[in-house]
Amino acid sequence: MAGLNAPKGGGAFSPAAADALARWCDETRALDGASGHTITAYRADVAAFLGFLTQYHAEPVGMARLAALSPADMRAFLAAEHGRGLSPRSMARRLSAVKSFIRWLADREGFDPTHVLSARAPRHRRGLPRPLSPEAAREVIAQAGALSDTPWIAARDTAVVVLLYGCGLRISEALGLRRNQAPLGSALRILGKGGKERLVPVLPAARAAVDRYLALCPMDLPADGALFRGARGGPLNPRQIARVMEQARAGLGLPASATPHALRHSFATHLLASGGDLRAIQELLGHASLSTTQGYTAVDTTRLMQVYESAHPRAQLPAKG
């Protein structure tokens, strides 16, 4: 048997297996509405699995091998991924993609996928969201507009950051807005992960920020083109907004967790702290599962306990005994 370490790019596998992987990706994109980034990640995860099997069995992996996968194959794969230093979270994601692929393949080839579907990745604790305080969020917005000497770029960066915090958008959703969606109305129709559509209320401050950007932007923006543009005229790269956040947090002394996505976390956490309904927040964020949204209740409880620990007048209570 070959070594257990899966190659980074995946090893060679049979044309039949490669064709099955391509068809599965196509169907997942078409039927589930998965994004291009998701499909790329799925393809890489399954290709790594097929590449591992190629090395593990010292032969290209074909359909017969996939139909005969054993518990030992799955244990060896997970051990190899652990040995490469893959985190439990990443291993769980990779195993989930493999299970989806094998389940799809078993339905078409008529084999029993039980050994694959029963495999378990190491348990991992989902990290709590790390939001900014309301004061820090306001400071980030102000800082974002002061980082560029070019007025339209400063207005653009402010508009994007305000949409992330004021509407709870993902960075991909904010940068996916089209010119014909502005001026913004009282609500935005957002197409999120998995093709899930939702309506998001738009605050006056967000409308005003986008209006200011449009008033200053020197470019002719086609109606069906990207609303937010880079300095050279192409669609704005999310990396640019990440850099804006990096500079803002450096100037404000905020932790590395103050990323563009942290503004979305802050949106949800601050709504919850102000009495927002969990189901409503789930809808606003576009979460498929309420359990994902419930992570914010843990953040809120943690913060409440911190306030309790720091403010409760325990020193005034009589000592026991």
Image: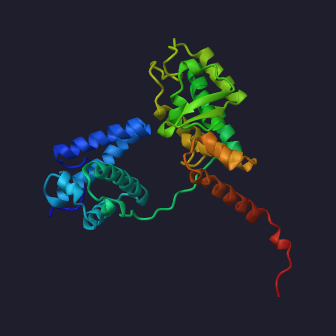
Residue at (57% x, 32% y) in the render? 190
Instruction: Inspect this view and state whether residue 112 appears.
Output: yes
The answer to whether residue 266 shows anywhere in this view is: no
Q: Position of residue 188 (x, y in %)?
A: 62, 28
Residue found at x 58% / y 21%: 181
Quarter of the image holding residue 150?
top right
The quadrant in which the C terminus is found is bottom right
30 on left or right of 287: left
Q: Is residue 99 left or right of residue 156?
A: left
**Going by the image, does 61 lie left or right of 159?**
left
Q: Residue furthest front?
A: 110
Q: In which quadrant of the rendered view does residue 36 lie?
A: top left
Q: Residue reaching furthest top?
A: 220
Q: Is residue 36 above or below residue 9?
A: above
Task: Find residue 38 and report its horizontal and vertical position in percent.
Answer: 40, 41
- Quadrant of the frame with the N terminus: bottom left
The x, y position of residue 42, in whole percent, is 35, 45
Q: Is residue 173 left or right of residue 321?
A: left
Quick check: 166 above or below 180?
below
Name the colouring of the figure.
Answer: rainbow
Task: Name the residue: 18% across, 55% down.
Answer: 64
Q: Nearer the viewer, residue 4 or 150?
A: 4
What residue is at 30 percent from the left and 58 percent from the top? 113
Number of on-image labels: 0
Please, is residue 208 above or below residue 73 in the view?
A: above
Q: Nearer the viewer, residue 62 or 230?
A: 62
- Position in image of residue 174 (x %, y %): 55, 31
